[in-house]
């Protein structure tokens, strides 16, 4: 006879399945930094029971994948969509987590109307600043005292460290970043405020990010931390690059967050070393070599890679304040569909069944080894 399992039954089954997990990341890294994951809507709405259990058991901070991006939360000039963000924040509060808001200003996932006047022409500087102010005041203000930190500006730099030519830059000018931080601080003076970007481990972009942070601080921006997205490969960044990057921002007197961590084990689909969501590559069998499962040799190599990365993060305890994985299990990862749709990716610590991988154990060991140094 067919029947539907209740959420309680699924919850208990999941807890039993995880009873053998030797430790919780949030406990092992207590005293080092927060450890978290980016959640999709099914997870914070408790429709993904398995994912929800992992989140509650393992993590003490959460980020939203999409529900606080402009196109989701403010799709039309006269309409905000707060139902899903409200549930996300309530989930974090219920589980006593540090809640992150992602993201206020980005060149992607922004409706076209934001940059246009009533005639469909490019908006002028004052008009766009007013829209930016109103958006930040409304969104940040709604969660004042509840969301602890915000990715204020996301991906403002090119790979060579110059400013990305976004509509924000073209219409407002370089001070759009300073204004965004000003408006966010005004809306919630106690919230942590971050600049977030990828590939900052490359020297040219790192130099650009260092100069950007210096300019923001000189302009009075309340920059708490830089977010290093951490969309890593098996061979990049090198441990030396990772170390040098964290040190560079430590020397500026700001914290470092690892904000979107995953490690891609699949063959490079492009010569571009980027995490630009706009990149798309045609599917080919050779780009999806592990559709039937990950070979043990690669599994162990991934574990070593994660162990090495976390050894660096642990070294900079006190500077690194948060490490957030971009997804909960391998099945949730954006890398299954970027930059090639339909690939089978294995970038996280938990497999598609929600079980901890060897990489999980390697991360735990890195924390324990760091604690005795």
Image (cartoon, rainbow, N blue to C red):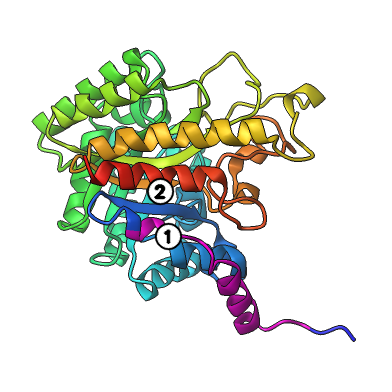
Q: Residue at x 22, y 36 (%)?
A: 316
Toward which corner of the image does residue 138 lie, by quadrant? Answer: bottom left
**Circle 1 Cα neighbour tier, 10 Å, few/some/many (<14 / 14–19 / ≥20):** some
Q: Quadrant of the C terminus?
A: top left
Task: Determine whether 10 is above or below 17 in the image.
Answer: below
Question: Does residue 200 show up?
Answer: yes
* Percent x, y of residue 294: 70, 37
Q: Give 251 or 11, whichever is nearer the viewer.
A: 11
SS state under label 1: loop
- On residue 364, the disc is 2
Q: Quadrant of the N terminus?
A: bottom right
Residue denoted by label 1: 23
Query: From the viewer's perspective, is 215 left or right of 102?
Result: left
* Percent x, y of residue 112: 52, 40
Query: From the viewer's perspective, is 16 left or right of 73?
Result: right
Q: Residue at x 34, y 55 (%)?
A: 28
Q: Residue at x 58, y 52 (%)?
A: 329
Query: From the viewer's perspective, is 263 left or right of 2?
Result: left
> Start and end of the magenta stretch?
4-27
SS state under label 2: helix
Toward which corner of the image does residue 197 lie, by quadrant? Answer: top left
User: Is residue 146 highlighted in magenta?
Assistant: no
Q: Give 358 or 182, whichever is nearer the viewer.
A: 358
Q: Residue at x 44, y 41 (%)?
A: 260
**Circle 2 Cα neighbour tier, 10 Å, few/some/many (<14 / 14–19 / ≥20):** many
Quick check: marks 1 and 2 in contact, CB under 8 Å? yes
Badge 1 or badge 2: first in the primary sequence: 1
């Amino acid at each position: 006879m067919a029947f539907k399992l209740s959420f309680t039954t699924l919850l208990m089954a999941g807890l039993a399945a995880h009873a053998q997990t030797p430790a919780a990341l949030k406990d092992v890294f207590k005293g080092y930094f927060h450890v978290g994951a980016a959640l999709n809507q099914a997870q914070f709405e408790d429709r993904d029971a398995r994912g929800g259990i992992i989140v509650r058991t393992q993590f003490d901070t959460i980020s939203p994948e999409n529900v606080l991006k402009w196109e989701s939360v403010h799709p039309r000039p006269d309409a905000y969509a707060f139902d899903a963000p409200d549930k996300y924040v309530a989930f974090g509060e219920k589980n006593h987590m540090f809640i992150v808001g992602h993201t206020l200003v980005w060149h992607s996932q922004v409706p076209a109307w934001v940059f246009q006047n009533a005639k469909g022409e490019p908006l002028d500087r004052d008009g766009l600043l007013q829209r930016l102010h109103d958006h930040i005041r409304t969104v940040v203000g709604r969660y004042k005292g509840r969301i602890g930190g915000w990715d204020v500006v996301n991906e403002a730099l090119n790979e060579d460290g110059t400013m990305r030519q976004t509509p924000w830059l073209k219409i407002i000018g370089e001070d759009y970043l300073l204004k965004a931080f000003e408006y966010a601080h005004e809306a919630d003076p106690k919230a942590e405020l971050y600049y977030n970007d990828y590939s900052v481990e490359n020297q040219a972009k790192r130099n650009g990010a260092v100069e950007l942070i210096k300019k923001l601080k000189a302009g009075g921006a309340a920059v708490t931390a830089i977010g290093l997205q951490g969309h890593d490969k098996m061979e990049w960044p090198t441990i030396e690059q990772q170390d040098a990057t964290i040190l560079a921002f430590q020397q500026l007197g700001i914290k470092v967050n690892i904000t979107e961590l995953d490690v891609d084990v699949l063959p490079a689909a492009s010569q571009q070393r980027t995490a630009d969501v706009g990149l798309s590559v045609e599917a080919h069998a050779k780009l999806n070599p592990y559709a039937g499962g990950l070979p043990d040799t690669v599994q162990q190599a991934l574990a070593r890679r994660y162990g090495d990365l976390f050894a660096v993060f642990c070294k900079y305890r006190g500077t690194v304040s948060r490490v957030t994985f971009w997804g909960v299990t391998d099945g949730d990862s954006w890398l299954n569909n970027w930059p090639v749709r339909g690939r089978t990716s294995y970038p996280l610590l938990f497999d598609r069944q929600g079980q901890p991988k060897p990489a999980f154990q390697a991360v735990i060991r890195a924390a324990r080894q760091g604690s005795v140094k």
